[in-house]
Structure formats: structure tokens, C-alpha cells
Amino acid sequence: MEAIAAELEEFCSTLTREPDFDAAELRAYDTADLLALTTAAERIRGAQPGTVVTVGDRHGALTLGAAAVLGATGVRAYQDPLLAERALAQNAARLDLAGSYSAEPLGETLLAGAETVLVQLPRGLEALEEIAWKIARFAPPDVRVFAAGRVKHMTLAQNEVLAKYFGEVAAGLGWRKSRVVQAAGPTPQFAGAEPPFPKWGADRELPFGLAAFGATFGGTKLDHGSRLLLSTFAAGQGRDAWGGSPGRTHIFDLGCGSGVLAVSAALALPSAAVIASDQSDAAVRSTALTAGAAGVAGRVAIHRADGAEAVADGWADLVLLNPPFHTGATVHAGVGQRLIRDCARVLRPGGELRIVFNSHLGYRPLLEQAIGPVRQLARDATFTVLSVTRR
């Protein structure tokens, strides 16, 4: 194992995170990638073309490691974050491995004929359940899943989710603070069952339902940060409330999740054009369903995009932002800082960014420097809502 791991680590050390958010303390791979590949190495080396699948590969370590080091051909890969997908593509092109894999949606085209599935365990159980159901539904009966993660982020609940869909679930020994859970024997009752996703939820403060696929931030619930941000409009705080906003004809929801902010804006301001974007595949699919059920699908343009790249310079009268504060499982304020700088570009002079964030992150100095004057609209024990005017 150590020899294979060393060969894989030497290869993975050539990978970069570009164009994903990068920092000195972040790497394009971790030991969970190495352990998944080494644990499955014998199966991968003897695999027929097109029978190895990766799910959740962050920057290419699983997909390209399987191809370049273990000899897999026709690898199929699904990644929820757009930046992970682009990082894999850039690494593959740079290493002359572009033809070794194909990017596929999470479903039958990804999993049909899959014999070995390598999974980077997602942060949420809902995301894991959707992955497990899709594998059990579309992969052959002899499929084997190798789900890897860092021990500090792994729980028994993840094994329980896998056990809902597979007859055999077993955790391997820890190695360099990582572990692999293997699953096999898809339970046949799910072959014709209704899919568990998307799920729908309701909130007493919302006049519409929320749809969510597994990896969608907040799921089917109105998260606390968005609730606090919306309360500043309902209370008429800031320069004006939803109903008193005739000048707000172009609204951008950056990091739309399930679509709660974009749909709220579209319902409150029926003459406004609304753009919603998120780099998460699950999020944009969820927002589309939420907007459709609320009757505003024709006025909410939805994009899977990196930051604000789908929006023209100076287009927005109002930007709504509830930024993430992590990259993968790593908490890092730089992710939100990157989005704040995007907001400066897309806001028109005099336009407003309304942002909610964990108070300890201290974004105010950057907001003042990058965008303009800042006023606090709300604050509780966890979150702060600010209004920032584009100078």
C-alpha cells in the first residue's frame, strides 16, 4: 500500500486548485484521495474501460490519479461545484490527460455500467443520500463503492445512510487521519422506487415552497442568515423596503442555494429582472424548481457560474449575498472575500449590496474598501446584516 500511495502522492503533488480559491494552506488533494485510490487500486488496474466512476472529486486527484497512475480508461466524473469541475479540466489539459475522463451529470449516464465508484464523502448527509440512491438505482448489482473522508469529519450517520441503500457496509482502518468506507450489494427495492430528491419544504415566513437536491446549502429550510437578511426588507430597514423600491429593476442573488432570496425578490418586485447564480449544480437545479413552483420562472435567470461571472459590469441595482465561509470542509474567510470583490464589479454606482455573514468574520473593512459606505441593518448572536452602497 505504501508504495502505491507514494506513487499516487507524487502524481497528486503536481495538481493545482486553479481556478478554485487558493491559499498557501490549501492543497489540491488530501490523504483521503490517496487512501481511496490505494484501497481500490486492484479493482481499478483490472477494470474494463468506462467502469470506474468518481463522485465529488475536488480538483482531479481521484479521476486523474486513477487514470495516470492506475491505468483506468474512460473514467466518468461528477462534481457538484463548478470550480472543482474546472480545476479537474485544467489539470487534465496541463498533464495531457483530457481524453482520460468525461464529465457527466449525477444519474444514469454517470453510473450505468459502473463497477468501481470512488466518492469523496460530502459534508452533508443529504448530499450523501442522493449519491447513494443514485448509485443503488443506476449502477450494476456488482458495483463497489469506496467512500473516503478525513476521520475528523466522518460520523456513524454516514454509514447508516449507506446502509439504507447497500447490503454490505464496512469501514476500513484509518491511515494518516483518513478512512474509507466500502459499500456493496445495492438493495433491489430502490430500483423502481420514487427518488428521494428533490425534497420540498415550507416556512411560515415564505409564501412559496423550497425545493432542494441533496447538496443544496440549507436544504428545504430557510437558513437563519437568509431569514435575518429578509427581515430587513420586511421591516423596511435600509434605504427602502421591497415595496418601496421602484429603482430596483436589476437584482442579483449571488450564491442562490435553493433560490429563497431570488424568488423573494421576484415576488416582491414584479417589474424587476432577477439573476440567480451558484457554482453548485444541486443549487441551480433547486432554484429552478423553487422559482417554477412560485410562478416566477420566466423572470429569474439561473446560472451555474463562478461568482458573478454571469453578470455584466454595473448591471445590478441590488445584490443579495449570503456568502459561504468554507471551501470543501475547510473554513476560510477568503471565499466570501472573493465574492465581495465580485459584487463591486457588478453593482452600478449607487447600487446596494445587502449581505449577511457570521459576525466573527469581520468583513466590514473589506466592504468599505472594495465597495463603499456601510450601514448595519441587523445583528443577532451569530449573524450581521449590512447595507453597502457602491461609491
Image (cartoon, rainbow, N blue to C red):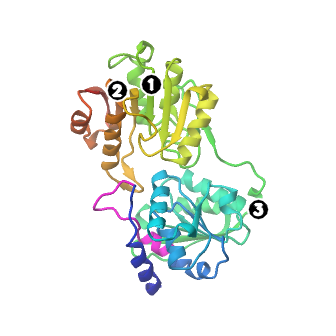
The dominant secondary structure in magenta is loop
Q: Quadrant of the C terminus?
A: top left
Q: Where is residue 274 in the image (x, y as percent from the top left)?
A: 50, 28
- Helix, strand, or loop for circle 3? helix
Measured Cα–Cα span from mark 3 to mark 1:
49 Å
Question: Quick check: marks 2 and 3 in contact, CB under 8 Å?
Answer: no
Residue 178 in the image: above or below residue 370: below
Tell me if residue 21 is in the magenta stretch.
yes
- Label 1: few (<14), some (14–19) or many (≥20) C-alpha neighbours in 10 Å: some
- The one of 158 and 261 positioned closer to us in this rendering: 261
The residue at the point 54 percent across, 74 percent down is 67
Identity of the residue furthest to the bottom in this view: 3
- The one of 134 and 99 positioned closer to us in this rendering: 99
Measured Cα–Cα span from mark 1 to mark 2:
10 Å
Q: Mark 2 points at which residue?
A: 348
| Quarter where residue 371 is shown | top left
Q: Mark 1 points at which residue?
A: 250
Q: Position of residue 200 (x, y in %)?
A: 62, 37
- Taking the image as shown, residue 196 lies to the left or right of residue 370, namely right
- What's the magenta region? 20-36
Q: Where is residue 321 in the image (x, y as percent from the top left)?
A: 39, 35
Kind of residue indicated by mark 3: Pro
- Label 2: few (<14), some (14–19) or many (≥20) C-alpha neighbours in 10 Å: some
Q: Where is residue 296 in the image (x, y as percent from the top left)?
A: 59, 26
Query: Can residue 172 be seen?
Result: no
Q: Name the residue under label 3.
A: 188
Viewer-nearest of labels 2 and 3? Answer: 2
